Amino acid sequence: PASKEGQTEKKEGALPVGKTDPLVTHLYTADPSAHVFEDKLYIYPSHDIESGIPEDDLGSHFDMKDYHVFSMKEPGAEVKDHGVALDVKDVPWAARQMWAPDAAEKDGKYFLYFPAKDKQDVFRIGVAVGDRPEGPFTPESEPIAGSFSIDPAVYADDDGAYYLYFGGIWGGQLQNWQSGQYDANGQLPKPTEDALLPKVARLSEDMRGLAEEPRDVLILDENGDLLKEGDNHRRFFEAAWVHQHEGVYYLSYSTGDTHKIVYATGDNPYGPFTYRGVVLKPVIGWTNHHSIVKFQGKWYLFYHDSSLSGGRTFLRSIKMAELKHRADGTIVAYDAYVK
Ligand code: FUB
């Protein structure tokens, strides 16, 4: 269980179930982005709260207001809560819904990337800068120019380049940006049309902006064709994450309404990526969101579920499990509920 520097909001009577226990039990946490900084594991999750907002398909009930950062010296060790790292009230451009964040380190500075709705109710991606992995972070006064949608994830490549992946459909608003401008009436493609895709752009040298126009991350099927919108067991929904294993780039993401984390592989950070299979089977709760990181020689999958809250989908808890790559590079699908 986590040590406590933040507020306490654990619900009594809700018991953890599944193969692993929640890493944090005094807060609800979700969307864990994990990184190794200064030889420790740092986790950057969303901080779930009960907002009282009714559930809808746009995720309005996910009305989070701040971020806490957590760290572990090693797997299985105590999880330390470093307290509030950034609050929506301190972000000049942001109005609400602090969704899944990520972080990166460059030249001794730490960068927290986060999505939030601006005052026009349009999701943008912001960046906040700090001197320590746990923050505190000082937000830039404007969102990242040219950013939109949700779920930022930063991949640091071996050559020193940093790539920002982002995007999500439905409440994540990717369908509203198909023309390059925000269109409040934007619709998803028809089931037989190409699915919408996550975006990628290299980050600028100062990590506060995009060095190029965001481009589509192509996800292909076994025939080299783009996945279709109706292929909702494989097509992209949200929660893009990239890791590299033995020279292969792995793009993993949530299929949203089919509740899986799946993956595709490619030979460079831009793709194209070819669909390969399942990383994580559906968990308790509607959303599925993860990260994959190597620490002390082993790969770990960080994910969340709603077991601690008794299944309430907007009150989630982060968990971790070892992730296995087979010798042929495929990933062993993880089922959080089969012992
Ligand atoms: O936590 C809010 C949203 O739910 C995230 O941004 C999505 O990936 C989903 O997990």
Image: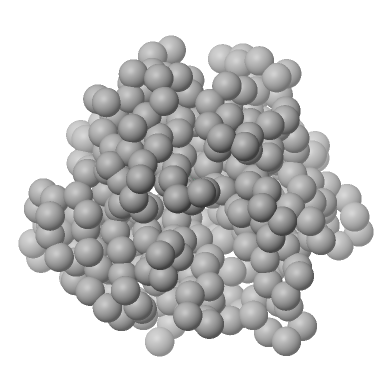
In the picture, measured across the screen, residue 144 lies left or right of residue 83, that is: right
- Where's residue 35, x and y in %? 46, 61
- Where's residue 54, x and y in %? 28, 33
Indicate the colouring scheme: one colour
Q: Which quadrant of the structure image shows residue 229?
A: top right
Res 243 seen here = yes
Most extreme residue toward the right is: 223
- How many callouts does the rendering have? 0
Res 63 seen here = no
In the picture, measured across the screen, residue 129 lies left or right of residue 306, that is: right
Q: Nearer the viewer, residue 331 or 129?
A: 129
**In which quadrant of the rendered image does the N terminus lie?**
bottom left
Q: At x 72% / y 62%, what residue is drawn?
A: 249
In the picture, measured across the screen, residue 272 lies left or right of residue 196, that is: right
- Where's residue 48, x and y in %? 27, 46
Is residue 233 positioned above or below 66 on the image?
below
- Where's residue 300, x and y in %? 49, 74
Q: Which quadrant of the structure image shows residue 273?
A: bottom right
Is residue 82 positioned above or below 180 on the image?
below
Q: Nearer the viewer, residue 233 or 139?
A: 139
Most extreme residue toward the front is: 107
